[in-house]
Amino acid sequence: MPERRRAKRSPVARRRMRRPAPRARLLAVDVGNTETVVGLMEGREVRRMWRLSSGRPTADEVALQLRELLRDEAAVGRAAPLHPVLSSVVPALTMNWGVALARHTGRAVLEVGAATAKSLRIRYHDPTSVGADRIANAVAARGLYGTPAIVVDLGTSTNFDCISREGDYLGGALAPGVATSAEELFRRAARIPRVELRRPAHAIGRTTAEAVQSGVVWGAAGLVDALVRRLALEMKGTPHVIATGGIARLIAPECETINVVDEALTLKGLALVWEENA
């Protein structure tokens, strides 16, 4: 049963950690169904990170967003080139972001997927069906935190991704996202008001708002703990459990099985995949 213990790094992970990270400047983008995360990176270090609403922007609108975000970088006249790397789980937006990134940086975009994550053995029946964000998270967890590992990505869906002691991607579980479930509850229940999702003061809510907060926040924490423990039973060793995603800071502190929160885990995974292909 995984509790708050740090997993031992495998020899492969230790060798990877000793390798000096290149200091190339990267423009890393993770396009999700609800949010798009943009990171300005030096090697594996995230210098700046922005969270945007994904929406349905055109390539021109994406290019404008990038110019606005990186205006300060242009103002100081940094000479080092930017290398673009992209993960996307929204096919309708993948091309628009790819075109805008290539236009902004003047370089070919590396799109993360099963083919470009060369060192990651994916033991899914169809490796190409694994989302790019899940691949990036697995690469980052393996390379930065050691194996075995479970990544809990709290976004539009709550993704559980398992990495074996040998560093292979095993698969995992998908559950409805915390905010996604809450939005559906607000939409379908006429007498339940929309409330801010935050840590409740009491498990027994004495108002409808308190009851919703208790059920959503602590219910999500219970789901995370139950699934992590069940997944760990099918893995060798005690996995290190890393939480990421836009709502991780709210849910992870209420969990018993989360070891660390790394909100930039996916971006770091993109940087590691870029290193493999550089």
Image: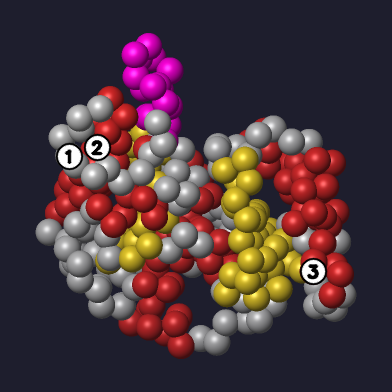
What's the mark number on residue 91?
Answer: none
Dot 1 or dot 3, earlier in sequence: 3
Dot 1 or dot 2, earlier in sequence: 1
Q: Does 264 appear above or below 65?
A: below
Mark 3 neighbour density, 10 Å: few (under 14) some (14–19) many (20 or more): few
* Residue behind mark 1: 203
Q: Is residue 24 left or right of residue 197?
A: right
x, y percent for residue 66? 77, 53
* Residue behind mark 3: 73
Q: For residue 104, say whether it is visible.
A: yes
* Residue behind mark 2: 214
Residue type highlighted by circle 2: Ser
Residue type highlighted by circle 3: Glu
Marks 1/2: CA–CA distance: 5 Å
Q: Main secondary structure of the magenta part?
A: helix
**Contact between labelled residues 2 and 1, with CB atoms less than 8 Å apart:** yes
